Image: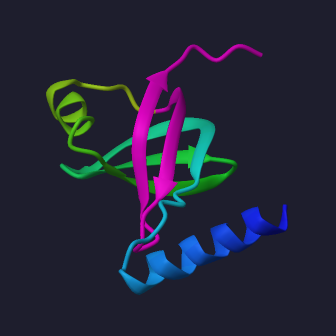
C-alpha cells in the first residue's frame, strides 16, 4: 500500500514537471425550462429558479440554429464548467414534463 502511494506521488510530481495535467472536468446533469437562444453560440435555461447561460458545443450549435424550438419547454441537460467558469452544454433533451 505504501509503495503504491509513493509511486502515485512520484507520478504526480513528474507530470507536473513536464506540464501534463489530469482532466478533472466535473459534469452536471440537471433539468429546467428552455428560454431561448441568446446568440448563435449561447442559450438560456431556467433551472432551480435561476437563469443560466450555456455556451453551445460545435456539435449542438447546428441543432439550435437549424430548428425552431419552442420556449418554456421542459428540458434535461448535461453540462460542465470550463477553465473560464463558463457553462458548456454537452447534451439536451426536450421533454414532456410528468408530475
* Left or right, 69 with reference to 50: left
Q: Residue at x 52, y 35 (%)?
A: 77
Residue 78 location in percent, x, y? 51, 39
Magenta stretch prevailing secondary structure: strand
* Left or right, 30 with reference to 51: right
Residue 19 sits above or below residue 87 on the image:
below
Residue 31 location in percent, x, y? 62, 35
Assess whether residue 93 is covered by the magenta stretch: yes
Which image quarter holds the C terminus?
top right
Magenta stretch, residue numbers:
72-99
Where residue 76 sits, quadrant-wise, is top right
Work out which residue is located at the far right of the displayed protein and give it: 1
Q: Residue at x 39, y 72 (%)?
A: 20
| Colour basis | rainbow
Count the numbered circles shown. 0
Q: Residue at x 72, y 73 (%)?
A: 6
* Left or right, 6 with reference to 60: right
Which image quarter holds the N terminus?
bottom right
Work out which residue is located at the far bottom of the displayed protein and give it: 17
Q: Residue at x 67, y 51 (%)?
A: 49
Of residue 17 and residue 38, the one placed in the foreground of this image is 17
Residue 94 location in percent, x, y? 47, 21
Residue 8 sits above or below residue 89 on the image:
below
Residue 34 sits above or below residue 49 on the image:
above
Assess whether residue 84 is covered by the magenta stretch: yes
Amino acid at each position: 500500500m505504501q509503495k503504491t502511494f509513493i509511486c502515485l506521488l512520484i507520478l504526480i510530481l513528474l507530470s507536473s514537471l513536464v506540464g501534463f495535467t489530469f482532466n478533472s472536468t466535473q459534469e452536471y446533469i440537471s433539468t429546467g425550462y428552455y428560454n431561448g437562444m441568446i446568440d448563435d453560440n449561447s442559450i438560456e435555461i431556467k433551472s432551480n429558479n435561476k437563469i443560466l447561460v450555456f455556451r453551445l458545443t460545435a456539435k449542438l450549435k447546428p441543432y439550435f440554429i437549424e430548428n425552431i424550438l419552442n420556449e418554456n419547454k421542459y428540458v434535461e441537460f448535461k453540462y460542465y464548467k470550463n477553465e473560464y467558469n463558463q457553462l458548456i452544454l454537452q447534451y439536451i433533451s426536450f421533454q414532456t414534463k410528468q408530475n
